[in-house]
Image (spheres, rainbow, N blue to C red):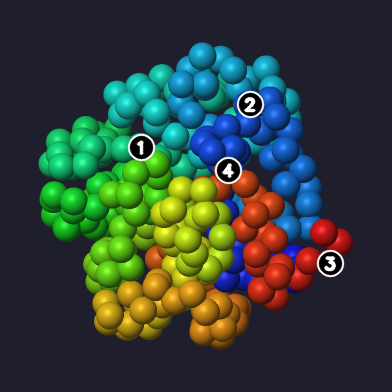
Amino acid sequence: MSTQVLRLLAGLIDDAAVFPPGSASLPAAVAAHRRHRDSWYADLVGPLLVPASAVVAGELGPLVDPAEGLVIGLIGDTGIERLPAALSALTPAGVTARQIEVVVAKRGEDPQPGLAELLKLTRRGGPDVYAELPLTFGLMAALDTLTAARADGVPVAAKFRTGGLAAELFPTPVELAAVICACRDRGLPFKLTAGLHHAVRHRDPETGFTQHGFGNVLAATLAAADGAAVDEVAALLAATDPVPLIDRVRAGRDADRPLWVGFGSCSISEPLTDLIRLGLVNGGDA
């Protein structure tokens, strides 16, 4: 692993270039992802996230040389029931799905039926599967279901939304802290999506929404893994001063990242620039 990227940050940012607000074309995203994988900061970057609809439509195959061994994360935008078709379409293209991510319920819906459907399709030894759960009705019971499945050897975990185009899609620091601690208590890994373009919590001047910082989440997760209570975790999520966040990240720099698998960003350069400015990544030949 490169000495320019801390072990703690390995694979933190999945390449979500084709998703809003970036919305790159798939050919442009594949070309850019190759550059990321060949860069000095490659250890920071996870797989390219590709919608299942594009895979089923045959849009990915012509862009890939089977010999290159492209690794992707499959985003189930066509629903749980269409995931097998998308996975089958990857094999001729020489593409490997490292992970599958899919929404199992809308806000206010019981996530258990969707989870049951997803678990029927999830096999031991297959790719990791992340069930996107709404931070509303039935959440804790859904976490219990995922925890029981993992204990049975099924490679499933949780995914939560931390932003979007509506205010209710942004959990408060206390709400997010409670979820992080709930995952900690269950030994349950989780992913996050949306609203994490910058390292430190801030107000977006265009939308007026206060965005979570991925540095806040990293510091908060480290604290949770060390046994911190919800209020301490929430305080780190709410912090706008980067100093305590940097200090906690540097203290854990040489360890594997606990609990938090990572997040998808439509821009790799924005979070990378923040990490360089904060001195958490060695910009070297950037």
Residue 257, x across and y down, in percent: 50, 69
Residue occupying the point 31% across, 58% down: 171
Query: What is the crowding at mark 4: few (fewer than 14 residues within 10 Å), some, or many (at least 20)?
Result: many
Residue 244, x across and y down, in percent: 51, 84
Q: Amino acid at mark 3?
A: Gly
User: Mark 4 or mark 2: which comes first in sequence?
Assistant: 2
Q: The C terminus appears in which quarter of the rendering?
A: bottom right
Numbered disc in front, either 4 or 1: 4
Numbered disc in front, either 4 or 3: 4
Q: Amino acid at mark 1?
A: Val
Query: What is the crowding at mark 2: few (fewer than 14 residues within 10 Å), some, or many (at least 20)?
Result: few
Residue occupying the point 27% across, 69% down: 174
Query: What is the crowding at mark 3: few (fewer than 14 residues within 10 Å), some, or many (at least 20)?
Result: few
Residue farthest along the top direction in this orientation = 57
Inter-mark Cα distance, 1 to 3: 37 Å
Q: What residue is pinned by disc 3?
A: 284
> Which disc number belongs to residue 25?
2
Inter-mark Cα distance, 4 to 3: 23 Å
Q: Secondary structure at mark 3?
A: loop
User: Mark 1 or mark 2: which comes first in sequence?
Assistant: 2
Inter-mark Cα distance, 3 to 2: 30 Å
Residue 27, x across and y down, in percent: 68, 25
> Which disc number belongs to residue 152?
none
Q: Secondary structure at mark 4?
A: loop
Q: What residue is pinned by disc 1?
A: 102
User: Mark 4 or mark 1: which comes first in sequence?
Assistant: 1
Q: Amino acid at mark 4?
A: Cys
Left or right side of 44 for 74? left
Residue occupying the point 70% across, 70% down: 277
Q: Are marks 4 and 1 in contact (CB under 8 Å)?
A: no
Q: Secondary structure at mark 1?
A: strand
